[in-house]
Amino acid sequence: MSDETSARIPSVFDQFSLAGRHALVTGASRGLGRVIALALADAGADVALVARAADQLAQVAEEVRTRGRQAITVTADLTNLDELGRAVDQVYEAFGKVDVLVSNAGISPIWKRSTEVTEDEWDAIMTTNVKATFFLCTNVAARMAEQGGGSIITLASVASVVGTPRMAVYGASKAAVAQLTRTFALEWARHHIRVNAIAPGYIATDMTAGVLEHPFFGNAIRQATPLGRPGQPDEIAGIALYLASDASSFATGQLFLVDGGIAAE
């Protein structure tokens, strides 16, 4: 093979580049949303950050800008469909298009027995984790279809596929997200829109701190995880970058478990 021919073969690392692309990340003010947004910026994407906490969003936006990328912030409660629509409109007005959507915003589990869950708690989890995810994805997908495609990443959970005591409603909501992901992938493949879900196990974030630090439940979680520890947020960022990029160009409708081995048992 000549040097000229060899020079035309792109490196596998080139497939992970997001240079020139625009991403929208919800729940971006902290936790997984923050680290995913920063990973996408590291790969070259400009990032729109959406969450309820304006001050925290501003801090993440500054972190994106220090990486040499553009960042915009939109404060919105995505359970309110008027606010959801306004947020997406603002992102498109700023960027013109969205190549990558990370639907990460979600409510933390209500850690209690199923017989103790109230109707208000059920509604809060389902509205945030399922309804907002559905309408965010459908809103953005309609525009992605017009622009020629894109990648949508949803956040499910290992609780989507294994029974998790005291987390019945959360598990049901994340199983719904996984099923929406599969259906969206089938419906939108003809528009060159790929849709995949990340299903984390127990990740050390603000959302899980109370459980992981509990003397009984925290230890039980470590014992139930074959790797013997909770994951770290940056251990989710890599799979998000993969799914956002051309490296995963033939992957759609999949649930990617990143759970320390819980679902393998």
Image (cartoon, rainbow, N blue to C red):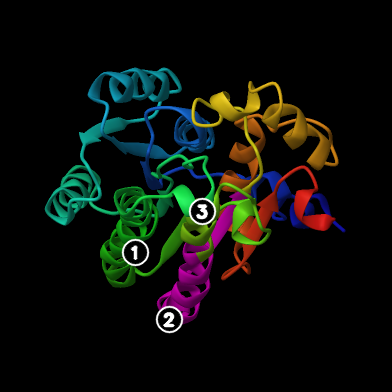
Measure the alpha-carbon separation of dots 1 and 3. Answer: 25 Å
Label ID, residue 134? 1
Q: Mark 1 or mark 2: which comes first in sequence?
A: 1
User: Tag 3: Cα neighbours inside 10 Å, few (<14), some, or many (≥20)?
Assistant: few
- Secondary structure under badge 3? helix
Q: Which residues are magenta?
A: 176-199
Residue type marked 3: Ser
Q: Is residue 197 magenta?
A: yes
Q: Give SS at disc 2.
A: helix
Quick one: 191 or 169, which is closer to the camera? 169
Q: Image quadrant of residue 187?
A: bottom left
**Which is closer to the viewer, label 3 or label 2?**
3
Label 1 sits on a secondary structure element that is helix
Dot 1 surroundings within 10 Å: few (below 14), some, or many (20 or more)?
Answer: some
Q: Is residue 101 left or right of residue 1?
A: left
First reached walking from the N terminus: tag 3 or tag 2: 3
**Amino acid type of disc 2?**
Glu
Residue hosting label 3: 114
Q: Nearer the viewer, mark 1 or mark 3?
A: 3
Residue at image coords 29%, 36%: 51
Q: What percent of the width, then of the height, locates residue 120?
A: 29, 50
Q: Which residue is mark 2?
A: 187
Is residue 213 shown in magenta?
A: no
Image: 82 above or below 145 = above
